[in-house]
Every structure is written in C-alpha cells, then in structure tokens.
C-alpha cells in the first residue's frame, strides 16, 4: 500500500482491492481500466490503458498527401468524416490552398451532421444503459409512462398508453426468450440504477426510436459526400459539383437532393428537441444527486474550436464552436491556443509503450515520433495474460499529450465550459436553461452527468447550425456562385519543396488535429493527436493523471464486482480507442469482463 | 423502399490491416466484374457499425464478405448461411468492426427488419499482423472464388448478375481511387520507414468468445413502426 498526491491534486492510494475491467465495452476499440477500491467502496487509484497499438502515422510516410484523408477515415468506423476533414485541412494549410465558400458550408454541414449523429447514437446506444434499466421497464405502468411522456415532451407524437404497452410487451418477449440483444449482460439488479420503471420504459422506447431515426441523419453526408458509407473528400474543396437543374440522386448536388437534405435537417432538429433533450432532463432529475465523474473538467479543459463561419478563416472570432484553454478552474481567463507553438502541445511517453530518442521528453507533433516499445516486465501475470498493470512503468499504447504541461479534458463538456467562460451567447443560454430546469448550481456541470448533458446540448446546437449553413449555401447558389472546388494547387508541380501544416476540428469526442510535413511532394511525417489521446492519456513524467483516470477517482461504487459507475464515467467521454490506439483487436465480450483481486503494496 | 426483393452485398473489414481488408476488396472485385439491376446494392461497409443499419434492414437478401477466424487452414474459403451467420461474425478475434456488425444484425432483428436470406462468404486470414499491408497471396487467390460463390448463391435466389464486358477501372471502384488496391500496394512505405507489427499480447489472446444467436424473428420483434419523416 502506498499513498501519494499527483501534481494535479489527486490523492492516490494503491491499497485496498484492485478491480480490473477489461475490456471496457460499448466503446470503439479496446480499453482496460484498473482501480483500487477502499473499504468504503470508494475508488482511490485509477489506471486507464489503451491496449491496442497505434500505427496510422507510420503507414502514411511517403504517400501522396492528397490521399491521406482516405486512409485517416479508415482508422475507425465512427468519426470517419472528421478525420477526413482534419486531414484535408492539414494539407491545405501546408500548401496554402483556399477553398470556395460553398465548400466551407458543405463541409460544416457534414461535420455538424456527424456531431448530431454521433452524439445521438452515443447517448442512446452506448451510454443510456449506464443510466437506464431495460429490465426495470417491464414493471412500468404504460398509462403512467404515457403521462410522463406528455409531461416531459408535450409535442412528441408518440405518447399513448397503447404505444408504450406494445413496446413493453415486445420487450417482455425479448427478455423471456433469454435474448436481450444489445440489452444483455447488464447489471440489472444493481442499486446504482435510480430511475422509476416508467422513466426506464420511456427511455428504452426512445432507444428504439433513435435507432430508427439515426439512419436518416447519415443520408445528409451520403448526398453531400457523393458516396455511401465512406463519403468523398478532396483537398481544395468538396467533390460533388453543384448543378441545381440536374437530376438523379448521389453524384452531384441538385435541387431534388438539396430539398431532401433540408427535410432531414429539420426533422433532426425536431427529434433532438422533442426526444433527446427532454430525456436528458428527465434522467437528470433522478440522478442530480449523483455528481461523480467530473475529473479534471473543473480544472483544465481544452478546445481548438471549429465550424468557420466564413471560409479559410480559422481565427477564434470566426469559429462558431469556441476555442481556448482553461487552467486550474479559472473561468475568468480563457487562454488562446496555438497549435503551431512548439511549447504548447507536446506528447510525452514515460508511461506509454513507445520510445523517444535519448534525452527527449516532450515532442511537438510536427516533430512527433511513433516508435513502439512494448514492455510489461513489471506487470503482474504474464505477457499474454496480464493480471495487473504497473502504472509506475509503461502501461498504455496511448501517448500523454499535455498543453503547457497540463493534462486536459477535451470534448463536449470542455467545449461548453470554454463557451460558458467566454460568454458564448447560445451556449450560455443553453447551460443556464438546464441548470434552471434541474435546479442545480453551475458546479454540477463538472460531473459525468454534466458531460452527458453538454453532449445533448451540443447536438441541439449543431442541429440548429446545420440549417444556418444550409441557408447560407442556398443563398450563395442563388447569388450565382456554384464553385465547390479550387484546383489551383492540385498539381504537385506547383508545391514548394518542403512545407508543413496543421489541420484541426472538434470531433464529436473532442479536439482533433493532424500535423503534416510534406517533402518532395510526399508525406514526410504525419501525426494525429486525437481526442481520446487527451482524455485517455496515462500519467506523464510529473505524475499528472489523465481525464479518464481522474473521472474514476473518488467515485463510490455500489458493488465492486459490478462496475456500473466506472462504465458510466468512462462512457460519458464517448471513448474511441480505435484511433487513439490501433484498430487491431479481437472481439470484445458483450459487457465488461471484470476481475477483482486483493492487492498488497 | 420498393416491393421488389432488395439485395445488399456488403464487404466489411479494414483495408489498412492486411487480410482484414478481404471483405471490402471482394465486394469491390464483384462490383468491377459484375452488374445487376437496381434492386442490388454493392457496398464497402468498412468498419462501420450502426451506420450500416439503414442498408441492412432494407435488404431481403444479404451477402457479407469478410475475413473470418474459423480456426481452419489459412486461406480456406467457407460459406455460412442463414441463422448461423451472426454467431460466426462474433465468434473469435479478428477485428473491431465485428462486434459492431453483430450488433447491427441484432438491432435489425429487434426492429423486425432482419434479412430473409443471409450468406457469409468468409476466408480464413493468413496475415493480419501487417499494418499498412495488403492481402496476402492466398487471400488474393480467393477473391474470384468468393465472388463466384456469391454470384451463384444469388442466382439460386433469382437474383441475376451479368458479367461486364470490361472490368471497371480504379476510378469506378467502390473503395475510391485513393485507396485502390494497386495504388495502395505500390505506394506503401518500406518496412524500415514504417513499423508493421501489432501487439502480440492482443493478437494471440483467445480470451474472447461471444456466442450470439438471433432470437426468433417476428414474435419478438420490437419495431416501433414509425415513419419518422416529418413526424417527430
């Protein structure tokens, strides 16, 4: 047993019982969490590990920079478009390529569409089951559920007792057949679930409605990207030409498919307002006493900003999604972030399975090195069956990025905290609305519940902004501008011998940037610092713990062998280990495979 | 959706990970050599999970190409039909997308829109520990047999394919010209430049085994049957 205090203020105690959750499921990719739990069932030490190797950067070496987006969007199946957008921005920045106004509007709609889609799917299909108990829904009274539905969302058309009875009966058959599908293997008797049966039934019903609705959202990107499942992107603009009088579906933008997009954008806005937001408020009312999981969100948050209003201007004033860094919880000062400054963002590897050249500590991504060095000799167990990681040595495939030496949280909550601190009008209004509805102080934001609420608010904001850019696109087309691509520097003969650039976006799960160096018309170095690298980072040289680890700290777990609370905290970040580490893994089990072992020392 | 029987031919997997890209390459191979009427869609599913649901639930016939760990000799082609398909998709290791795709099938089932006919065209991978790599020789040899197996199964269902006079070029591929097989292979960085191996501990682990079987179809389906267009 050992106690220590981290520079970012956490009291670690490695005594008590060690609980291992591996794999953490309902995430993209492969992740492991280990915690120490004291005699009061409170987490006193937390370790998070990305257990897959990351190698995307190295396979891009020597390739054509104009192809990079197609590789980066294959990193995983979730934020394909965001990686592609970040990549084309990095190349454009490097080569000084400007894109037409229409391309900016189209890219923004695609990016916002992905935000809404990812947030909705994440909440209902990956995170809701940490709050909602589908088995408990069987005990609900359909009439009372109907009354609840009409109270929380009077405009939602699906609210009759018969509707809920029907869903409940079908759910009952599913449960009785022993095939719970996505609902199986939950800890459905755990007292950590706090909703009454009616709220559970309402939420499970919306799980199904969201499953049904989310498919529509994808169509926006399919039409705008001109291709299904993996939309096209291109350096210099967007690939689909605008031909308002054209006919046919995918392949070009005409009035028929633009009208179709318009309808989807309006329906999305309505669904978010009538279903997602009311659900968050309804669930929040029952969980507002459970304010664990804030981690470092009350101290250090980081956002790069995104959604340029006018094309090619990435200054903070022109970005509709706010940028900035907050340190030590000082909301009065939001500091500017410069992705080119070698002293701001640096990646460290003392607790990661990588090695840097002798004597090198932190590296700015333009000079980044990705050299694997897997060593688990001090972990308990064998290399093929690790019982317990050694957090004093290397223990993750994730590097540790730091902003001016600080561990930072990124993502919807970070963006909303930055926006709130900067007095961003729409964000402040949304946050105040939720605080008022739930009757909680502003500090309640810094919690797992706050993170989950911020994601919903951001989905609402993004749904509104999609329509803003749609209108802007149409107005520009009507004014006679149909350009979507600037081919001026498409030919590598027009490129300088050497150049470097950085592209950034706010991916659904947080700040994302790609740094590129181009030499002799080929990629010389490519480094991605992805959101889950920030949030899921291991300890750094000074011993600062990362956002995932901090979110688990001091959380009380009802039953150590059923880590609902750990999953709830981790899922609230929408972890995507596929790109923060590497895509390779075997299938995960349906829910967590938990092993607990006593620990001495 | 029309009344006509709809067919989806889906390649899944990650083309960046050697033989893991088999499914996507096989679907592309089929697309380049055959054409169908508009009731048939050939699609590069990549590693997308839930985002494929809209396509899967519209399909009456579903063909899935994928690299599958059957525990057989590397390069072995094996066809799985009907109710056995989901459990093979979730059987053992191989890759990230499979949990996702198994869940897509479970969701389609929950919504009462499970395909009537399923065929899984799987090949036992030879080499997956080769990041940035392409299909191994044995896998490439199975591309044509895999395509022919799918075409022949569809033919028995009355879905007719006609062979193109000339295969389509790389610019007409379903994966996109940037990542077309020939370009992907020829521009690969050298081994000295780019480390190609993965994490042995993960690769060799066999601690994961999920046996998912679909529930009986219609009686348990939980479709919400909502036409959401303009209604929410």
Image: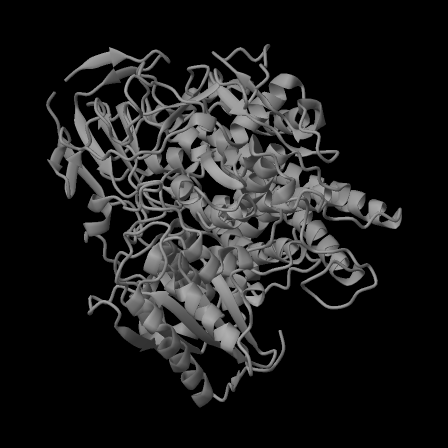
Quadrant where the C terminus of chain A lies?
A: top left
The correct choice, above or below, for A301 with respect to A261 in the image is above
Q: Nearer the viewer, residue A404 or A157?
A: A404
Q: Quadrant of the N terminus of chain A?
A: top left
Say whether residue A476 is left or right of residue A470: right
Q: Position of residue B11 (x, y in %)?
A: 44, 66
Rendered residue at 19%/53% (across/down): B206
A137 or A577, which lies in front? A577
The residue at 29%/31% (across/down) is: A354
Q: Is residue A581 visible?
A: yes
Toward the viewer: A69 or B188? B188
Left or right: where does residue B89 sit relative to residue A95?
A: left
Side (left or right) of B115 relative to A356: right
Q: Residue at x 46, y 16 (%)?
A: A299
The answer to whether residue B47 of the structure is visible from this angle is: no
**Residue depicted at 23% across the width and 53% down the height:** B208
In the picture shown, does residue A331 fall above or below A355? above
Q: Based on the displayed image, in which of its 4 quarters is residue A362 positioned? A: top left
Which color scheme did the rendering employ for the protein?
Answer: one colour
Along the horizontal axis of the image, is B88 left or right of A345? Answer: left
Residue A128 placement (x, y as % from top left)? 45, 44
Q: Position of residue B159 (x, y in %)?
A: 51, 85
Picture layout, residue A417 above or below residue A177 = above
């Amino acid at each position: 047993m050992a106690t220590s205090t981290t520079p970012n203020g956490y009291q670690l105690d490695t005594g008590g019982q060690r609980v291992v959750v591996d794999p953490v499921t309902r995430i993209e990719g492969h992740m492991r969490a280990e915690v120490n739990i004291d005699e009061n069932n409170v987490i006193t030490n937390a370790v998070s590990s990305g257990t897959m190797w990351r190698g995307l950067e190295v396979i891009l070496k020597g390739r054509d920079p104009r192809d990079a987006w197609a590789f980066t969007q294959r990193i995983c199946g979730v934020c394909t478009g965001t990686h592609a957008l970040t990549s084309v921005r990095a190349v454009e920045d490097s080569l000084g390529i400007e894109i037409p106004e229409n391309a900016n509007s189209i890219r923004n709609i695609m990016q916002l569409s992905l935000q809404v889609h990812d947030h909705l799917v994440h909440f209902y299909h990956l995170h809701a089951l940490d709050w909602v108990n589908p088995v408990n829904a069987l005990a609900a009274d359909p009439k009372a559920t109907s009354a609840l539905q009409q109270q929380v969302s009077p405009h939602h058309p699906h609210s009759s007792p018969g509707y809920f009875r029907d869903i409940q009966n079908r759910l009952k058959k599913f449960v009785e057949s022993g095939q719970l599908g996505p609902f199986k293997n939950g800890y459905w008797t755990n007292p950590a679930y706090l909703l009454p049966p009616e709220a559970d039934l309402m939420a499970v019903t919306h799980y199904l409605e969201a499953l049904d609705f989310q498919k529509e959202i994808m169509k926006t990107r399919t039409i705008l990207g001109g291709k299904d499942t993996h939309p096209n992107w291109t350096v210099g603009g967007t690939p689909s030409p605008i031909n308002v009088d054209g006919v046919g579906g995918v392949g070009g933008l005409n009035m028929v498919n633009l009208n179709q997009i318009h309808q989807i954008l309006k329906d999305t806005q309505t669904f978010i307002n009538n279903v997602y937001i009311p659900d968050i408020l309804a669930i929040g009312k029952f969980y507002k006493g459970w304010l664990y999981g804030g981690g470092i969100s009350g101290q250090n948050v980081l956002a790069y900003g995104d959604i340029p209003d006018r094309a090619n201007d990435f200054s903070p004033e022109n970005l509709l999604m706010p940028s900035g860094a907050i340190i030590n919880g000082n909301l009065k000062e939001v500091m500017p972030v410069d992705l080119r400054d070698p002293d701001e963002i640096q990646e460290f590897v003392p607790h990661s399975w990588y090695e840097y050249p002798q004597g090198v500590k932190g590296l700015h991504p333009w000079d980044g090195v990705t050299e694997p060095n897997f060593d688990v000799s001090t972990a308990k167990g064998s290399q093929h069956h690790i019982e317990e990681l050694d957090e004093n040595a290397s223990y993750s495939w994730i590097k540790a990025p730091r902003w001016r030496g600080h561990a930072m949280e990124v993502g919807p909550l970070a963006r909303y905290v930055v926006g709130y601190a900067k007095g961003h009008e729409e964000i402040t209004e949304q946050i105040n609305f939720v605080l008022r509805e739930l009757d909680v102080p502003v500090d309640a934001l810094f919690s797992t519940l706050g993170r989950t609420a911020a994601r919903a608010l951001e989905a609402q904001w993004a749904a509104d902004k999609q329509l803003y850019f749609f209108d802007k696109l149409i107005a520009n087309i009507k004014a006679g501008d149909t350009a979507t691509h600037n081919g001026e520097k498409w030919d590598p003969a027009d490129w300088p011998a050497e150049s470097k650039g950085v592209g950034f976006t706010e991916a659904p799960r947080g700040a994302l940037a790609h740094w590129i160096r181009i030499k002799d018309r080929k990629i010389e170095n490519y480094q991605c610092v992805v959101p889950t690298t920030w949030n899921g980072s291991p300890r750094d040289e000074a011993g600062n713990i990362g956002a995932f680890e901090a979110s688990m700290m001091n959380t009380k777990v009802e039953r150590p062998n059923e880590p609902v609370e750990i999953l709830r905290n981790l899922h609230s970040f929408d972890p995507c280990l596929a790109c923060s580490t590497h895509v390779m893994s075997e299938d995960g089990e349906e829910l967590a495979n938990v092993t607990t072992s006593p620990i001495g020392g | 959706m029309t009344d006509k029987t709809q067919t989806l031919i889906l390649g899944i997997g990650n083309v960046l990970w050697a033989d893991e890209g088999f499914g996507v390459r096989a679907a592309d191979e089929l697309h380049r050599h055959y054409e169908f009427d508009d009731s048939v869609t050939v699609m590069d599913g990549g590693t997308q999970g839930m985002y494929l649901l809209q396509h899967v639930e519209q399909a009456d016939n579903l063909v899935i190409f994928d690299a599958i760990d059957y525990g057989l000799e590397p390069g072995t082609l094996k066809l799985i039909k009907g109710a056995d398909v989901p459990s093979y998709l979730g059987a053992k290791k191989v890759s990230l997308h499979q949990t996702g795709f198994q869940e897509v099938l479970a969701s389609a089932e929950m919504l009462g829109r499970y395909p009537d006919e399923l065929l899984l065209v799987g090949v036992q991978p030879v080499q997956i520990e080769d990041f940035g790599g392409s299909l191994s020789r044995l896998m490439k040899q199975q591309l044509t047999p895999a395509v022919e197996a799918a075409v022949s199964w569809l033919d028995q269902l009355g879905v007719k394919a006609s062979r193109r006079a000339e295969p389509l070029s790389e610019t007409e591929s379903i994966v996109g010209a940037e990542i077309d097989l020939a370009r992907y292979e020829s521009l690969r960085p050298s081994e000295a430049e780019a480390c190609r191996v993965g994490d042995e501990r993960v690769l060799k682990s066999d601690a994961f085994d999920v046996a998912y079987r679909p529930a009986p179809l219609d009686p348990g389906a939980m479709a919400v049957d909502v036409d959401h267009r303009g209604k929410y």
